[in-house]
Every structure is written in structure tokens, then in C-alpha cells.
Amino acid sequence: EAGVAQSPRYKIIEKRQSVAFWCNPISGHATLYWYQQILGQGPKLLIQFQNNGVVDDSQLPKDRFSAERLKGVDSTLKIQPAKLEDSAVYLCASSLDSFGTDTQYFGPGTRLTVL
Amino acid sequence: QKEVEQNSGPLSVPEGAIASLNCTYSDRVSQSFFWYRQYSGKSPELIMSIYSNGDKEDGRFTAQLNKASQYVSLLIRDSQPSDSATYLCAVKNTNAGKSTFGDGTTLTVKP
């Protein structure tokens, strides 16, 4: 079974530029999560999709971050414009269902550096 | 108060010792509890999940849950240098479909 795929693995941009990340979850997983992990901290949920609907985006900075999961499968997360404090690892995860007891499976992450 | 709090660490134990990692949570209706291991530069991977009060053992790992005290712990017996990593506690409210992670405890096992 293929795992969660993410690209790119690394990205370096200057502040005020835009960037997009892509995620393809495990086949059959209805729930997709985007997390931001700053060095030394735990993953912080940015947005959670159940199929192509949003379950939780309360911590997504909507003035600069956007995410979509149009066909209920893969997803993109965009930052525009980027700030220095956006430097972090962006993790995508998937699970069978938002409301079950199943675990989340994480992709390898995208390490973003904003200069 | 953070929703999920873990020992700030770092925690250092000698090889062969028992490592004890603790986690407290604030959402009383949480039903599912997870321990993830994260090696430096890697993504989190699941070690244990626990849903009922009491102990759950899997090899060298034992998870303990006490919902009345809102406390979950992970014991690692016979610690090995390969156990050196950051351990993340995650708590899930399945009704709301919401999971929250702690900031992790970094464990170092010294040969």
C-alpha cells in the first residue's frame, strides 16, 4: 500500500513570494490533514478535510493561507504572501475517517524556508 | 493552558532502563489517544493507540490511560539507542473529529 505522498520535499523562497504544496493521501482515506510543524513544537493543525468538505480550519491564517481538495482525493496548500514566520515543515496526513478511532498516517513533509 | 501537555524534556536514560513519558489533556470528552515517534528530520509514525482505561502492551512499549485523571503515559522498557527520538502524544475527540498534538518529549538513550 502506497503511503502519503507530498511534494516538493524542500522549498526556499523569499518573503512576500507565494508557494504551493501538494499532497496525495493513502487510497481510500476520506480524511486529509495539513499540519504546520515549527522546530521544537508539535504538529499544529491548519486544515482538515473529510472528502472535499472542511471539518476544521480554525487555525488556518486565511489572509495568506488557502487549501483545496476539489475531488476529494489530493490536495494543495498555498501561502501567499509568505512571511518569515512561515518557515516550518508542512506535514500532510490522512486517515480513514475524521470521526473514527483510526490513526493518521503522515507524509514525508515539505520543509519551507522563507528568507 | 495547552490542550495537550507533555513533559518538556529532554529526557535522558541509560540503555536498558525504563523511559517514562507523560501526557495530560484538557478535553474531557476525548476518546482516542495516540503515541507517535518522530525521528529528527522525519515525519511522525504511530507507536501505540489506546482507547480504554488501563494498560496496553505491545512489545517493549506500554501505554497507560486514566480518563478520570485525564492522563496518558508511555513506558519504554529495555530502552535502546534506536529509541532516541521525540515522542508526540495526540488526543482525539471522535465526536468532533478533532485531534490535537502535544509539543513532544525528546528522549535520548545513552549507550
Image (cartoon, coloured by chain):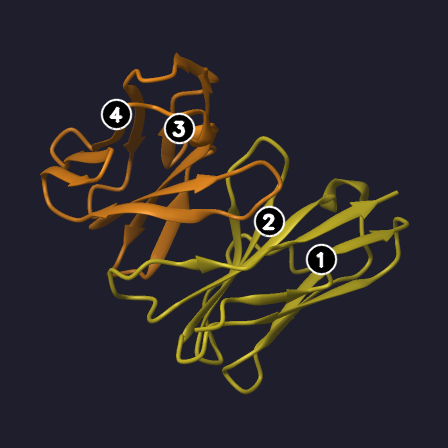
Chain colours: A yellow, B orange
Locate residue A84, reporting x and y percent: 81, 41
Name the amino acid type tagged 2.
Answer: Gln
- The chain containing the residue under callout 2 comes to A
Name the amino acid type tagged 1.
Answer: Arg
The span from disc 3 to disc 2 (Cα, nearest Å) is 20 Å
Residue plotted at (63% across, 34% down): A39
Mark whose residue sits in front, 1 or 2: 1
- The chain containing the residue under callout 3 comes to B
Give neighbour class at mark 4: few <14, some 14-19, many 20+ (Cα, 10 Å). some
Mark carried by residue A9: 1
Give the SS element for disc 3: loop
Mark whose residue sits in front, 3 or 1: 1
Q: Quadrant of the N terminus of chain B?
A: top left
Q: Which residue is mark 4?
A: B77
Is residue B67 left or right of B47 when viewed as pictured? left
Splitting the image into 4 quarters, where does residue A109 fall? bottom right
Name the amino acid type tagged 3.
Answer: Gln
Mark whose residue sits in front, 4 or 1: 4
Mark carried by residue B1: 3
Q: Which residue is mark 2?
A: A36
